[in-house]
Image (cartoon, coloured by chain):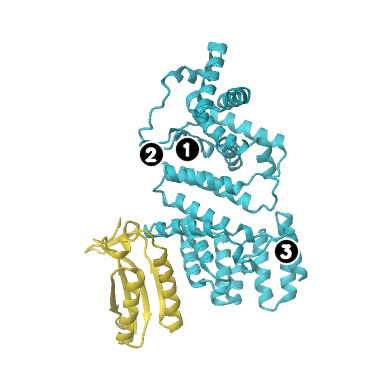
Chain colours: A cyan, B yellow
Amino acid sequence: MTEAFRLERGRAVATLVRMLGDIDAAEEAVQDAFVRALEVWPRDGVPPNAAGWIVTTAKNRAIDVARREGSRQSRYEGAARLGDGGTAPDPASGIAERLDQPLEDDQLRLMFTCCHPALGLESQVALTLRLIAGLETRDIARAFLTPEATMAQRLTRAKRKISAARIPYRVPSADELPERLGAVLAVLYLVFNQGYGEARTDVPDLSREAIRLTRALVTLLPDDLETLGLLALELLTESRRPARFSAKGDIVLLADQDRNRWDGALAAEGRGIIAECMVRRQAGPYQLQAAIAAVHSMAPSYSRTAWPQILALYDQLWSLQPTAVVELNRAVVVAEVNGPERALSIVDGLPLERYHLWHATRANLLARLGRDAEARAAYLAGAELAPTQAERDFLIERADG
Amino acid sequence: MLFLIAAQDRADSPFNQLEDHQQVWTDLTNLDAAMREAGVFVFSRGLQAPDAAVTFRVSGTGATNEQAGPYGPTTLSGMWIVDCDSESEAREWARRCAEAHRCEVELRPFQPHVSEYL
């Protein structure tokens, strides 16, 4: 029941937020409806439209509360509008008209609220996982190695900020959309990566959540190429996960992964999506990263990868996102196309001394050039900065090997 | 001899009729590799859609006027530059470009740089 419960709760909360105009009230009402379901369903059986039952019950519950608290409680004033049952479409946006799934429409609205720029990135991520994915606070806390109380506080503060700053529950207008959508995609990708770096199985699978939410976003914005690009990137990256950790839980680098263990179905889906995106010739950063992952996914081995193709994609990515981290990743490809010496001269010029992967990349290039003592020092410097134990262990092992 | 092979994006080209383009991307990747192997490869890249273009016009007084959009109606969608020993060799590569991309291409030789005359 938990999985279905979570998904339905996410949808129901989004609908109730639209009706009530208040996140806490919506969460309470939906929680009460589920408690009621646990009492009634075992006795009377699960109703045919369980999701609709939850929303109706939560709505009635909210009306009850609003009546009981009367005019003293202005925060439930939205409940007065419950009778009309619907919402005015956002006239500024063409999106609302394309939606035939009203529940998901509500979730999209709420997603933009959760990822509003007035909230910090950490709050955006936490709210999205709580309200859209329907995760429990303690599970979100565990995934981010944060005490539950801290996470609960972060959520409470973020919700307070939404009502204090009067952040609206709506899909942004067409002229705001690209920028606001960028924030939503950034949050989803961060959630995905948080899960991807994780070998533990005792925490919720955030990568899967991110894919599910990105898929939902794609059904709502089917023509947005960067949203499609992000979905393809997530699918192609996720396809490599079965080969990413050894049986002992150690990291296995792309070069050393057993490609037979890659998930061919996920990769094929990702490739199919990105192949059609590229036809439109409006490549953005997510599409380009997905295209790079697609080229990797087709290579029979690391050495037989179409490196010049990947380098061309990195050049294009760099022209859109001229950051030191993109240049570092590009340098790894330069090593395959033009040799480690050329790559090292690029890496040495990057201001990334605080980034463990800068040291790890340097170390690898130095080792390939036979400069073993320098390579060892660089591996150890990287280990000192590594954010996870798995990465620390990996780099120390390389230094000793 | 340097040659430009320019891909032309036309609504009626087989490329634009395909539902699944994965084989095209694979074939183009393999074609690049074949060009490198043959030692004729200089450059290849697709172009973003024409609405990404910016046009710079100069007036009689030499002043430059910048405006968004392509210079005029255009079907140019990407290019290869190859360095071949003969025109017949370049024609052969252009034919392979058209087949891999499933679209029309135009082959045009470069002329020597002006500095080479002087």
Tell me whether the residue at label 2 lies in contact with that at label 1, contact meaning CB atoms closer than 8 angstroms.
yes
Residue B57 point in image, percent of width and height: 26, 62
Circle 3 chain = A
Circle 2 chain = A
* Residues at discs 3 and 1 both on one chain: yes
**Marks 2, 3: nearer the viewer:** 2
* Residues at discs 2 and 1 both on one chain: yes
Going from N to C along the chain, the mark reached first, 2 or 1, is 2
Going from N to C along the chain, the mark reached first, 3 or 1, is 1
SS class, disc 1: helix
Residue A152: quarter of image: top right
Label at residue A95: 2
Mark 3 surroundings within 10 Å by alpha-carbon count, few (fewer than 14), some (14 through 19), many (20 or more): many
Residue A60 point in image, percent of width and height: 52, 19
Label at residue A395: 3
Residue A143 point in image, percent of width and height: 67, 44
Label at residue A374: none
SS class, disc 3: helix
Label 2 and label 1: CA atoms lie apart by 10 Å
The residue carrying mark 1 is: A108
Residue A172: quarter of image: top left
Circle 1 chain = A
Label 2 and label 3: CA atoms lie apart by 48 Å
Q: Looking at this view, is B97 or B106 the one in front?
A: B97
Instruction: Quadrant for the C terminus of chain A, please.
Output: bottom right
Tell me whether the residue at label 2 lies in contact with that at label 3, contact meaning CB atoms closer than 8 angstroms.
no
